[in-house]
Image (cartoon, rainbow, N blue to C red):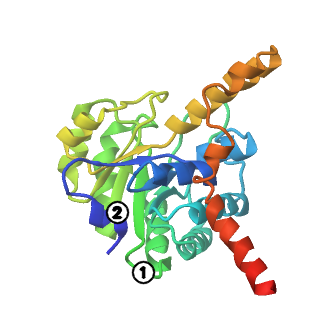
Amino acid sequence: MNRFQAMIGQGRPLVLPGVHDALSARVGEQLGFDGLCVGGAAVGIMQFALPDIGLQSFGEYRDCVARIRAASTLPIMLDAEDGFGDAKAVTRTVRSFEQLGIAGLILEDLMPLVAGEPVRTLPLSEMSAKLEAALRARASTDTWIVGRTDVAHAGRHEEVAERARRFEDLGVDAVLATGLRSLDDMKRLRDSVKLPLIALVVETKPWIAPTLDEVETVGFEIVMHAAALMLNVVAATRTALGALRTGHTGSAASHGPTLAALGPLLAAAEWQQVDLAARDAAQ
């Protein structure tokens, strides 16, 4: 059984913090989260200092995700963007990330953003073909394929339920809809499908950012906080570098851990054992 499937329906919604590198994934696991999510925007911003407009390549993204996957044993819900192209690209995307051990892949109907133009989404027929390709490509049904629709984000709120039902008919494992304006919008989506639903909570977006209690009330099973950590890290980076720039070297490090305290987080003892074993073997 898919690890996300095994964790939902047991009380409170499953909370997935967004991580963007190996260290944040490791911290998330040590703090006791049950799973993680990785967003294309967060990786692009934090790894490449690029805006979320489709600039990072599939290979760049895959390599970053591989490092994140290697740092944590937790199941990862991955933003697989639009599959990085047509049905062939979607097939490669699903196969590649499944081989890395990614537990869930979210595929969106959002078309590449173009400056000065409104948000656009793929026709439902084209998105359906992509999801069908993704479902055929996975080696195991234990790998979740999640259908994401941005039609509400594009202003076509009346199409959300139609797309969600179509995704369900295709056989996806869960649905995520962005751009919902209210709890009533969320309830209408909940009433439209029986599949697990994912709430993407981003406080800086022009749509509802429900609390955990509100998510539970409307019956969504999973909450993804894709950008919260990233935004806090950017703020902390500005604060620390600003302190150094003005000569306040002590205050720049006063709120963080010491280098020695990072040892357990970095599994330093394990690497010391490798050294000791090699030394003993050489004697």
Closer to the eye: label 2 or 1: 2
Report the residue at 47% width, 52% height from top: 30
Tally of numbered tags: 2
- Where does residue 221 sit, x and y in percent of width and height? 27, 51
Report the residue at 78% width, 78% height from top: 279
Whether residue 247 sits left or right of residue 72 in the image: it is right
Give the vertical position of 55 relative to 186 (above or below): below
Q: Which mark is residue 224?
A: none
Q: Which of 231 and 278 is in front in this view?
A: 278
Sooner in the amino-acid sequence: mark 2 or mark 1: 2
Give the vertical position of 184 relative to 133 (above or below): above
Residue tagged by mark 1?
140
Circle 2 crowding by C-alpha within 10 Å: few under 14, some 14–19, many from 20: many
Q: Residue 4 carries which label?
A: 2
- Where does residue 271 sit, x and y in percent of width and height? 68, 66
Q: Nearer the viewer, residue 280 or 232?
A: 280
Badge 1 amino acid: Ser
Badge 2 amino acid: Phe
Circle 1 crowding by C-alpha within 10 Å: few under 14, some 14–19, many from 20: few
Report the residue at 80% width, 85% height from top: 283
- Where does residue 93 sit, x and y in percent of width and height? 59, 68
Residue 15 visible (yes or no): yes
Q: Which of 46 and 91 is in front in this view?
A: 46
